[in-house]
Amino acid sequence: MQLLYYWKVTMLKILKYSFYDLARSRWSYIYFSFYLILALVLLFLNNDLSKAVITLMNVIVILVPLIGTIFGVMYYYNSREFTELLLAQPIKRNSIFLGQYLGIALSLSLSLLFGVGIPFVIYGLFDSAAIWDFSLLLLTGAFLTFIFVALAFTISLNNENRIKGFGYAVLLWLFMAVIYDGIFLMSLVIFEEYPLDKLSLLGTMLNPIDLSRILILLKLDISALLGYTGAVFKQFFGTHLGYLASTVVLCLWTVIPIFRILHKANNKDF
Amino acid sequence: MIEVVGLHKQFNKNVVLSDLHLNITEPGIFAILGPNGSGKTTLIKSILRMVIPDKGDIRVLGKDVKKTSDYRKQIDYLPQIANFPSNLKVRELIRMIKDLRGKTEKEARLIEQFALQPYLDIKLGNLSGGTKQKVNILLTFMFDSPIMILDEPTAGLDPLAMIQLKELILEEKQKGKTILITSHIMSFVEEMTDEIVFLLEGNIRFKGDIQTLKTDTKQSDLEHAIAILLESNHA
């Protein structure tokens, strides 16, 4: 128990300092202002909270993973020597890497929360019916941040060469955000004679970006736009079981890379 | 104090350390020397468990380094390249390391000694290489651990800071500490160290004091004695 307590304290210390470091970085503010401006422009153009939420979703679902990936890789490689300094201190490796990971993921999530949140609150979010849709949007945004920062950390831990690490990370994002959908649609067209409901459900579940998009679309109740497949999705995701399953899948997408990080970090030479 | 038994480490197919035994029992200054790629840094990093050996055991003050991270409280380590988080100020970095390692009052004296006062509120990313190395030295010397490991401590220092560093190291030696140093500057080694551990191709080629090395190789200065060691290996 004592040991666990000690471990938690040092991890929180690392988290605190990584967070301070990032909270002062120019990039955090650029990221924050980007979302601030985006939300303001969307609200100005749409004049309607629910519509702004939909447009915002399309941007968030693609952009949050990209930023998470790039930030994660950049932070890891930039702080390598500093990590070495920490490794020489009487601290467990797990607490160093977990602390740094949480530091980035939290500061990015907060940039998103405040960047998008402030304009919407000013615009009267709390009096609007869109508040739940909006909360779900931010929640999945946070999930995507945690998932993609963890994946980026895993990739950079496995690649000494930063150009390679960067390349793989961007490729991963490209695959999840664009190529996966392409393959998915192609296979739906090619195998259209077969019943594909189950398969398309599974395909959606396996990609966190697609899963987030579908979750929000269904919550916004515009699944009619999705046609027949939409109806199948509604049947599944609309239920409590569907929500539960999606949450579990998103959690798995977060937790498995974190375990990979810890495993790799414990066996790596610095 | 430091006991290394049968240490073996290879990176992919490149064997860096093979069956290395080293036992340091008494206090004093030990220089770890050797050509580039002879495994100096790998040895140091294995002691700190930043590198994980393939085979062998390391004990520091009787504690197995595999089992605990706590033994590192007994080691002050000066890394070779000092690259700190660029958005932290010097003052905050000092506070942070103190936060992680424990209380100390010694930093005030060191700040004064290295004239770091004007840099305390400057972000680490904006410091020059030499000033960063001074901060690095400060972080290492502000604690009072029985073992010190200094990896190329003289890098980037101006002559004045160099003199101060030497004084600091000797002062720590007076306290009865065990100090391991790697350096490429032979005059520095000759002036400072009691004993030499010479690594070659992953193993210890020579261990003993400078005088013995000189008489063994029939040379009057250290630089040539080391050269003889290297040549005899090629022959």
Image (tube, rainbow, N blue to C red):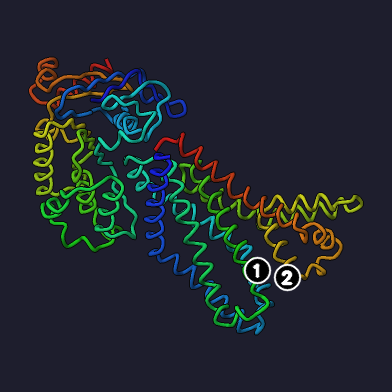
Seen as rendered, the residue at the extreme right is A193
Q: Is A216 rendered above or below residue A179?
A: below
How crowded pointer 2 is (Cα within 10 Å; few <14, some 14-19, many 20+) is rated as some
**Label 1 chain ID:** A
User: Which residue ends up furthest to the front in the rendered image?
Assistant: A1
Q: In the structure shown, which secondary structural element does the residue marked by tag 2 occupy? A: loop
Q: CA distance from mark 2 to mark 1?
A: 11 Å
Q: At x 85% / y 55%, what residue is drawn?
A: A189
Q: Which residue is mark 2?
A: A220
| Callout 1: SS | helix
Horizontal placement of B98 versus A50: left or right?
A: left
Q: Position of residue A117 (x, y in %)?
A: 55, 73
Give the quadrant of the C terminus of chain B: top left
Which amino acid type is marked by label 2? Leu
Residue B163: give x, y in percent of width and height: 9, 44
* Residue A114 placement (x, y as % from top left): 51, 71
Residue B27: percent from the left, percent from the top? Answer: 15, 27
B155 or A246: nearer the viewer? A246
Q: Seen in the image, is B108 located left or right of residue B38?
A: left
The residue closer to the viewer here, B212 or B146, is B146
- Residue occupying image coordinates x 17% and y 51%: B107
Q: Tell me which residue sits at (92%, 52%) in the image.
A: A193
Is there CB contact under 8 Å for labels 2 and 1?
yes
In this rendering, position of residue B116 left or right of residue A269: left
Displayed quadrant of residue B196: top left
Q: Do the residues at discs 2 and 1 belong to one chain?
A: yes
Residue B131 shown left or right of residue A245 in the figure: left
Q: Which residue is mark 1?
A: A57
**Foreground residue, B107 or B112?**
B107
